[in-house]
Image: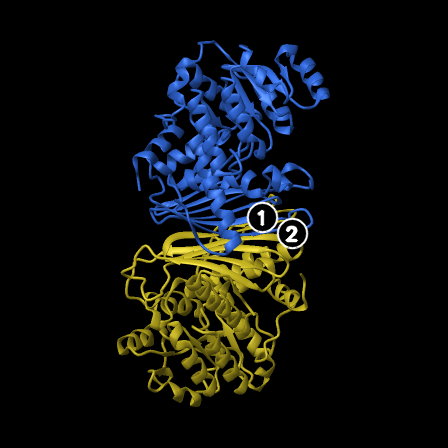
Chain colours: A blue, B yellow
Amino acid sequence: MTSRRTFLHAAALTGAAATISPNVLLAATAPKKEKLGVALVGLGYYSTDLLAPALQKTKNCYLAGIVTGTPAKAEKWKKQYNIPDKNIYSYQTFDQIANNPDIDVVYVVLPPSMHEEYVIRAAKAGKHVWVEKPMAVTAKECQNMIDACTKNKRVLTVGYRLHHEPNTQEYVKVLRDGKIGKVLMVNCAAGYYDARTDHWKQKKEMGGGVMYDMGVYVLQGARLATGEEPIAVTAQQFTSRPEVYKNGLDETSMIQLVFPSGARASLQTSYGMNMNYLHVTGSKGTLRMEPYSAYNGQAGDWNGNKIQHPYEVPWQQTKQMDDDAEAILNNKPVLVGGEEGLRDIKIVEAVYQAARTGREVKIT
Amino acid sequence: MTSRRTFLHAAALTGAAATISPNVLLAATAPKKEKLGVALVGLGYYSTDLLAPALQKTKNCYLAGIVTGTPAKAEKWKKQYNIPDKNIYSYQTFDQIANNPDIDVVYVVLPPSMHEEYVIRAAKAGKHVWVEKPMAVTAKECQNMIDACTKNKRVLTVGYRLHHEPNTQEYVKVLRDGKIGKVLMVNCAAGYYDARTDHWKQKKEMGGGVMYDMGVYVLQGARLATGEEPIAVTAQQFTSRPEVYKNGLDETSMIQLVFPSGARASLQTSYGMNMNYLHVTGSKGTLRMEPYSAYNGQAGDWNGNKIQHPYEVPWQQTKQMDDDAEAILNNKPVLVGGEEGLRDIKIVEAVYQAARTGREVKIT
């Protein structure tokens, strides 16, 4: 199946064209700058170890401010990155960011359960919004976030770093160009052993469960490989640590997707084991990536041809933020708008329903 | 889980010991020979291109006779392999094989629906029996075949060539030795594009359907990798050629297995696409084989260590028949007795039930 949407999606990934986000066309109302000032909301591991270092390397944006509930973190970051006091916010003072011309973009790096609130508050404050994956906990929240950004004429992007990544872009182009024929079966696995027991990833009320966090990688693997949206899902969920993963929280999910073309996907994601690969069976060959969603080191092959674009961490995050800032600065379409994140969360909801009921669930 | 049976099974594969088949201990009643005479029943592709050439290379057995319903084939084989007229049977004269001391073993290479009848007739004729995979269409048929061989004090083996194969034996040993830790997830796929439309593989009444033919390879992959028997299964079946695969016949099956230890397997098998790999995720690493069930060329790695024992076709079939003949000649346990084939057919029946009902099926 090669629908117009599918074509556009593939084209966006391969740099030839781009999907149209309704937010993007509104970006022209932002004042023209050389570089966008970014405020990170939530200073956990990902902000500390990946995004802040990446923002020291970006060309189109820079670390302008922070939002944190921990004064000690504020002090540390202020010194380390030379952030002026006026650009440091707590969650209580966050809405005053509306009056700060240094901040053009708010990057929400909070637990998933807090995404909706802070994306909407940021949009209302007149800021463009980048939000980490998973976009939110429910499709309804995702839609509210999209609507808030549209209403406030702000750009919304989701932190799907792999869309900006050359190994991913190459394997998608290989598949979309038909190099291995028609895509028939996708196998994709992404997991790691998470020894933690009280992180948000292990808390249902904070948006925990592996399907949200690592699960979106395997859904993305299947959607990017096929260039299609799944129409039905069966799923199985289980845990080897019931004392940690309880109240319906999944440590491991196994997912089977049905696509309109007849292609199928078999996906696994886990907090209980280390695995990371993509294996695509086509009518004229095979494409493999392993690892396929790491921060670097991706490697693969198709019909004897290698795919390997090496780089150092945090190149992916640097590229993602530069791409997104460049799109905003030049009023161009973004690679990953809110609709893309919403699609995955719709599937995540269907996966949980399928696992709970033990029945196939249609995805509309 | 390391049950005694599991240990024995692994040990058999790694050459240290062997499973005990109830038939085997009875083999002492056969007259002692240097080489066993084998009669092939059914002269299709597998007999013609693999088994007959292999029987020219075996040390412990040789091609002594044939059973065919096609006079032209009888004439061709007779000349090509110098088979005496008295060792050539039709399906009508087959039972007279009881009086032929040249024939020690009957190798049944017929469509699966005919296995039960010819295995039982061969056992009643006082011959040891080798039967191609899948062992039969139903578990009941498998049990009848086992019972007939036991009653007639004949050895029964199933043509699972991979149990005799050094790459398989090495990966099983690596896993059983705990080299990648506890086995947590098995991904295994085996399929090829079958362009035929009226072979027995496309006929339900002859034991067709991919789950029987290629499906037992992925079940074997999961059972060998875990060393366990599955306790529950979910499955999805579909076809891209409904005009060929009809009346409940599967072109492609996707299977998810639950094992007692908590390990899981995700398996795919198909007549609609070419795929062949095994991917095992352990608590301390990963093992991969690709291809894993071909007639030669198997290759793999685990935690950076290579697995690769090269050989030429039909080495596997030669080794399998030599192993089985040697066990019979020396009254030793066989590597793959009837019980091993029966276990897979029990799972195949559960897979069809799970796919038909859309529900998890317990395997007892």
Q: Amino acid at mark 2?
A: Ser
Q: What residue is at 67 percent from the left and 53 percent from the top? A: B178
Task: Kindly identify the amino acid type of the residue bearing the numbered disc 1.
Answer: Thr
Chain of the residue displaying label 1: A
Q: Is residue B275 above or below residue A15?
A: below
- Residue carrying label 1: A252
Q: Are marks 1 and 2 in contact (CB under 8 Å)?
A: yes
Q: Position of residue A259 (x, y in %)?
A: 38, 46
Could you tell me how far apart the alpha carbons at marks 1 and 2 are, in whole angstroms?
9 Å
Residue assigned mark 2: A240
Q: Chain of mark 2?
A: A
Locate residue A37, reporting x and y percent.
54, 14
SS state under label 2 = loop
Q: Residue at x 58, y 31 (%)?
A: A114
Name the foreground residue: B7 vs A2.
A2
Is B335 or A42 nearer to us in this picture?
Answer: A42
Closer-to-camera residue (A217/A16): A217
